[in-house]
């Protein structure tokens, strides 16, 4: 009995041994945790350099250890990647559906409008849309408009600007015809007894006489301007500075030629009398009106 009692440890020894083992175990666990924490703190600055601000905020909000933080970051990034892939797939499906729809309609994939087919010939009728109502007075066959043309003033017949000298030489015979027509109208007017017909003949005779007077006056003015230009060319050839006629100078030459023509025809006094009456009527407007008694 004594041997068994000596061999068996007491309760205090058992408790002390167990407490010592637990303490040693706790010390070993504490040392491992400290080593892991130190390793984590040493690696954390290096990892934080490559981490984003969102990942740091996630770590701070959850307050988990390094392993849990890694797992949480991996889960969150994986979910975001899945959402991005799903959104991209949806966009691709939508685009492919729109492209297929436009291709089925025969339109351009770049724009929503349908392409209008071009005509092989511009004179063919244009294809109208069936969605719009057709007007009652629509021109079915489009024809080119007829335009009047005068070969005298076209570029194909010479210079685009009318040369009056060449024109007068080419159509000078028309003046002779007009003179003969005026003489015939004068004879017809003397024989006519009907008042209405005589009035029409007189109006036609007056118009032709005015046209002839204007033509002769224009010829005189152009002749005077031509002579003035000829003198200027001769002066320039002799060393004088060139001078170009202004509008006022051309007007003065025109009036001089007109007075000379009226003097030759013996109508200058009558013309001057009309001119004086016209000027007097203009000046009469500025006179004071009569007082009423």
Image: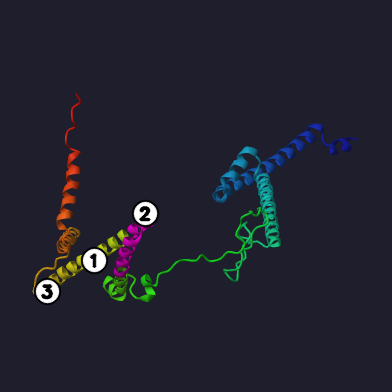
Q: Main secondary structure of the magenta part?
A: helix
Q: Secondary structure at mark 1?
A: helix
Q: Quadrant of residue 220?
A: bottom left
* Numbered circles on residues, count: 3
| Nearer the observer, 198 or 149 | 198
Q: Are marks 1 and 2 in contact (CB under 8 Å)?
A: no
The Cα atoms of the two marked residues, 3 and 2, are separated by 59 Å
At which x and y percent is residue 111? 61, 58
Most distant residue in the right direction: 1
Image quarter in which the N terminus is found: top right
**Residue at the spot of label 2:** 195
As measured in the structure, the alpha-carbon distance from the residue carrying label 3 to the one carrying label 1 is 27 Å
- The quarter of the picture where the C terminus appears is top left
* Residue bearing the label numbered 3: 234
Q: Residue at x 60, y 64 (%)?
A: 141
| Location of mark 1 (residue) | 216
Q: For mark 1, does the 10 Å Cα neighbourhood hold few (<14), some (14 to 19), or many (20 or more) residues?
A: some
Q: Earlier in the sequence, mark 1 or mark 2?
A: 2
Name the residue: 34% across, 63% down: 188
Q: Quadrant of residue 196?
A: bottom left
Is 265 colored magenta in this rendering?
A: no
Disc 3 element: helix
Q: In whole angstroms, how far apart are the C-alphas of marks 1 and 2?
A: 31 Å
Assign a secondary structure to mark 2.
helix
Q: What residue range appears in magenta? A: 179-204
Q: Nearer the viewer, residue 233 or 54?
A: 233
């Amino acid at each position: 009995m004594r041997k068994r009692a000596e061999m068996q440890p007491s309760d205090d020894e058992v408790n002390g041994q167990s407490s010592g083992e637990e303490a040693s175990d706790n010390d070993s666990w504490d040392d491992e945790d400290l080593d892991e924490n130190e390793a984590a703190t040493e690696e954390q600055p290096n990892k934080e350099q490559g981490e984003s601000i969102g990942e740091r905020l996630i770590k701070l909000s959850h307050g988990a250890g390094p392993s849990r933080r890694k797992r949480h970051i991996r889960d969150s990034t994986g979910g975001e990647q899945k959402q991005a892939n799903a959104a991209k797939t949806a966009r691709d499906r939508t685009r492919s559906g729109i492209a297929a729809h436009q291709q089925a309609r025969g339109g351009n994939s770049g724009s929503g409008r349908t392409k209008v087919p071009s005509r092989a010939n511009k004179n063919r009728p244009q294809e109208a849309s069936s969605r719009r109502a057709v007007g009652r007075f629509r021109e079915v066959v489009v024809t080119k408009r007829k335009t009047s043309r005068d070969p005298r003033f076209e570029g194909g017949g010479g210079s685009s600007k009318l040369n009056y000298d060449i024109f007068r030489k080419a159509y000078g015979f028309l003046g002779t015809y007009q003179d003969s027509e005026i003489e015939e109208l004068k004879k017809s007017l003397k024989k006519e007894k009907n008042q209405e017909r005589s009035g029409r003949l007189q109006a036609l005779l007056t118009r032709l006489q005015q046209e002839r007077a204007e033509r002769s006056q224009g010829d005189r003015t152009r002749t005077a301007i031509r002579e003035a230009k000829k003198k200027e060319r001769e002066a320039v050839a002799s060393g004088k500075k060139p001078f170009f006629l202004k509008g006022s100078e051309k007007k003065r030459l025109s009036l001089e030629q007109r007075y000379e023509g009226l003097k030759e025809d013996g109508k200058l006094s009558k013309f001057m009398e009309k001119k004086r009456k016209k000027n007097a009527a203009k000046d009469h407007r500025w006179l004071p009106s009569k007082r009423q008694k």
